[in-house]
Image (cartoon, helix red, strand yellow):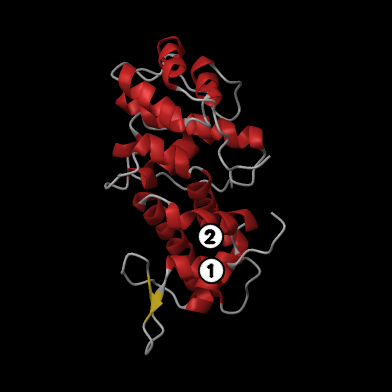
Amino acid sequence: MSDAPDYRAALSLLCPLSDPETGTLLRFDGTFWPTDEPTSMTALGLLPDAAVHRLVEEFPEAARPARHHVGTAVEMLAAAVDDYRDTRGRDWSALPSACAALRADVANALAYREVLDAVCGAEDDDGWRESALPVALAAFETGEAPTEPHEEGTAALVTTDYLTAERDVRERAGAFLMAFTLAAECPSAPPRLSSAGEPDGPVTAFAREHVHQPRVYAEAVRAQRTLDPQALAPVIAQRAPVPAALPWGA
């Protein structure tokens, strides 16, 4: 993507209305946005260009839980920018590092939107994805995590932006996210999943083979109630079309 990101278009999608008297922004779901327009534009300016492009392109057609997830992540980033301004005044030099985790959270919500639709459900009304994403990515990076991510609350946010990471890293993290989150729906003990610093084991490697088919993979896991590649492979082979790459770039 060579064109400059359209920050105003992104903000208009997130906050299509404002109070003409106070200038208060209203979110796309009718709730109040916590910051004014200049602060919100500053927050969007912290995001990688790819994240703003992805937001503008995909937000209108995204499922409602995905829009809520992305919108809340940007809202938290904007609120952090506002808090930073209140405490640090006009010294903006440390703003990017101070907001690194929240900035990465927005990018990762956009990077793994389709994976989260598949493993959490496009009609997720419980905000499972907002908990599953940070828990799974923290587990991927550290190798340590609760066994049931949707019951353990939100983990500390990672600072890695997987949207702009190298494709190999992005796909490995996406595969881990799929398998780790779906493991909670399998009755047997969760298998050992390979974290970022380890070579892919059989479960993680199989999930990675299907990271561009997250819905097919999730349906197979739920049908068989296991992450065992030997049980999943024939089921996926029967129903899987030729995989189309997720819009992650090279």
User: Residue at the top extreme?
Assistant: 230
Q: Which residue is mark 2?
A: 56
Amino acid type, mark 1: Ala
Residue drawn 35% across the image and 38% down it: 120
Quadrant where the N terminus lies?
A: bottom right
Residue drawn 53% across the image and 45% down it: 111
**Could you say whether the residue bearing mark 1 is in a helix, strand or loop?**
helix
Q: Are the residues at dot 1 and dot 2 in contact (C-beta closer than 8 Å)? A: yes
Q: Is residue 138 above or below residue 105?
A: above
Q: Is residue 33 above or below residue 149?
A: below
* Label located before the other in sequence (1 or 2): 1
- Which label was assigned to residue 187? none
Residue drawn 47% across the image and 61% down it: 74
Quadrant where the C terminus lies?
A: top right
Other residues around mark 2 within 10 Å, as few (<14) / some (14–19) / many (≥20):
some
- Which label was assigned to residue 9? 1
Q: Position of residue 189 (x, y in %)?
A: 34, 17
Asked whether, in this view, residue 148 is left or right of residue 80, the answer is left
